[in-house]
Image (cartoon, rainbow, N blue to C red):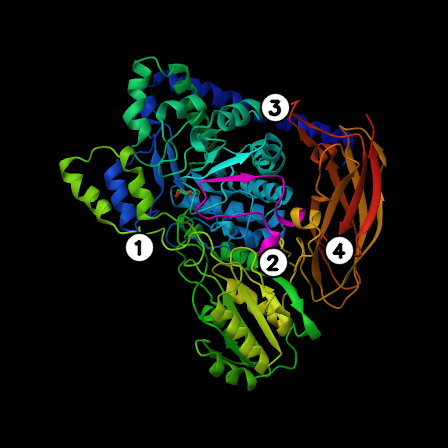
Amino acid sequence: MSRNNCDAKNISTEKSTASTSQQIEKKTGELLSKLTIDEKLQMMDGDAPFWPGMEKMLDGKYNEHPWTSGIIPGIGNPGIRCSDGPRGIVLQGATTFPVSIARGAAWDTVLEEKIGEAIGRELRAFGGNVFLGVCVNLLRHPAWGRAQETYGEDSHHLGEMGVALTRGVQKHAMACAKHFALNSIENARFKVDVKISRRALHEVYLPHFRQVVDEGISCIMSAYNRMNGEWCGQNKILLRKILKEKWGFKGFIVTDWFFGIRDAKKAVLAGQDLEMPFHMHYHSNLKQLVDKGEVPVELIDEAVSRLLREQLRYSDSDSGEYSRKLIASEEHRALALESAEKSIVLLQNKENLLPLTGVKKIAVIGKLADIPNTGDAGSSKTRPDYVITPLAGIKTAFKGKIKAVYNDGSDPEHAAKTAAGSDAVIIVAGYTHSDEGEFLDPETMKKMASFYPEPAPEEEYIARRLEQMKPEDSTGAFLPGGDRDSLTLSSEDETLIKTVSAANKKTIVAVMGGSAIIMESWREKVNSILMIWYPGMEGGKALANILLGKVNPGGKLPLVIPEKAEHLPFFDKNAEKIEYDLWHGYRKLEKENHKPAFPFGFGLSYTDFQYKNLLLCETVLSPSDTLQLQLELSNTGKFSGEEIVQVYISAINSCVERAVKELKAFTRVALVPGENKTVQFEIPLAKLAYYNESKEEFVVEAVKYEVFAGSHSMDPNALKACFSVQE
Ligand code: BGC
């Protein structure tokens, strides 16, 4: 296509978008003018009365239907009907994809967008219109119980994946990114105060949120925790100054669910638009605050306009084209399989044990081989109609080719005997929702009691039920789980691996879990290690396809796996206060010269890739330019495969302390044996800026930069080149 044609296309798209947004603006104004103040306030909180809502939570009936808000009869607005994720819609029968951290390991933005589309379609088929599952909290420490809900530890990677999911979902419904911001300790989420400098906030913890805002996301969910002394849900700096004013966010902000704000006046003044899911602070206080003039009506109008505008953006697709047949359709389940296959990371493969060849009998060992293990049981819990476990996947795929014998591993000596009599062994070990996940305990719920509305006489039994709950009682959905106590496998799993691998060295360990697991005590004793995360409803099939070599593993770690927990930042799951600085993950290990067990971005393949001829199109640029570069990639091995090419950049002689290098671009490339491809990247230099606290803005320094293009963050064969930025 010629350049002129291309420009003409852009102009006509802009026009149609502009007229649609003008129409939406006009309609928003019209609807707003029809609403009474009571109706406006009704749009600013959840529809559910408090005590019946609490009862559902206590009964474990959380998330069994979309949460609704603000459907005003006679006005014709669709209202808000939201449902959780991120591993799929959480309602009965929806497709369960691998968890986000697994999808992060696929580094495949095209696939992530397709997953977003599938989720958006299923949400609409269930009658929902807001997907609460774009979790882009930065993974600061692998003990975080909800690590599995996000994509990884690197802001650029996280932003790209979050944008892809948002783009896909928003073809059909509103997407909501969460939890804004600094939400990365689960057990302490209702109390912890995160102290942070403006530089660390803007450079490390916020850029990925900015990316989804720039993508046009409809909704941002604030976090429970505090930032620099103020609760995030009522934090004026975060919500009004940064999100709405500095970034120009046009959508609406929603609280996190269970008392995500503490003070209605502060929250509304800070820019909080919607309190979900029950009648809580806004319901009890906003009317009075407006009547007394303590909250200007303009602020209410602002919130309601934001809510209406986003609802209207999606109302024209309320057309009945979303049939129930879309839910877990063949196409969506195929995506879940593709995603699981692409997310599995081959960490070690001594003597090329994988893919399995010449094996007649394999021992499958471990309890996790034979249970559905799709991740957390909190708000992200999905309800698929089936889950293919590792054992089921292996049995089906190996049928007629390799005999699979199962031992649950509860007696390691017995398991070792089964292993000794087999040609190879696969142990499935790791975590479940009991070890890591969302956490809400009765103690926390009781601590919030001063905020609870007076129960009506017929509701008093619910309040009594809550009072009588003991610390260990399950709240239905949220216990156990929480932050991890250890970064290694359980001692039972480690003993099992050591005992079995002593009996048969041809051992493959498939590790399930939501983030980094330290493997030092056993990794040298086994031949192969696969990180399979929580791989979704088709996970067992994906694993079997990788074992047999039907699929070549191409996933890479979206986090660093350290040798020692001491190499990570300080973490305290019960912290009242904590300080977040610039350093975590691979950036911290590299700065402090700690060799990782497995580097960020690392993953093996059954084939070999060769990188050649890195070329920078220009080597002297100005701060507003975009760096263009290319390299040649070839598949020099015998298998078709996919390589994730990564580009890191270092600033040389910066005036501020910087990471040794940081990820700035990546792409997943498919190559058949012998094939060569030219891989191109464009990196706006704005991506290299640091946050200058005195100027309150990002600055692209006029210094020299080094480009490092390779297969992972510590690739010894990475290609290097330099360029400089001049004012
Ligand atoms: C979680 C959110 C979730 C919300 C609604 C909260 O407790 O922190 O991630 O979206 O509940 O279920």
Residue of label 3: 15
Q: Quadrant of residue 164?
A: top right
Q: Nearer the viewer, residue 451 or 55?
A: 451
Answer whether labels 1 and 4 touch (C-beta < 8 Å).
no
The amino acid type of the residue labelled 1 equals Glu
Instruction: Give the number of the mark in front: 2 or 1.
Output: 2
Residue of label 2: 564
The amino acid type of the residue labelled 2 equals Lys
Q: Residue at x 50, y 62 (%)?
A: 538
Marks 3 and 2, the one that precedes in the sequence:
3
Answer whether labels 3 and 1 touch (C-beta < 8 Å).
no
Q: How dense is the environment of label 3, judged by Cα within 10 Å: few (below 14), some, or many (20 and up)?
A: few
Residue of label 4: 715
Q: Residue at x 70, y 75 (%)?
A: 351
Q: Does the beta carbon of the residue at mark 3 sit less than 8 Å from ligand 1?
A: no
Residue 621's spot in the image, x, y percent? 82, 31
User: What residue occupies the far bottom of the structure in this picture?
Assistant: 421
Q: Does the beta carbon of the residue at mark 1 sit less than 8 Å from ligand 1?
A: no
Instruction: Give the number of the mark in front: 3 or 1.
Output: 1
State left or right for residue 38 relative to residue 226.
left
Q: Residue at x 31, y 38 (%)?
A: 448
Residue of label 1: 472
- Report the magenta residues as a range: 565-587
Marks 4 and 2, the one that precedes in the sequence:
2
State left or right for residue 437 relative to residue 610.
left
Ligand 1, seen in the image, is in the quarter at top left
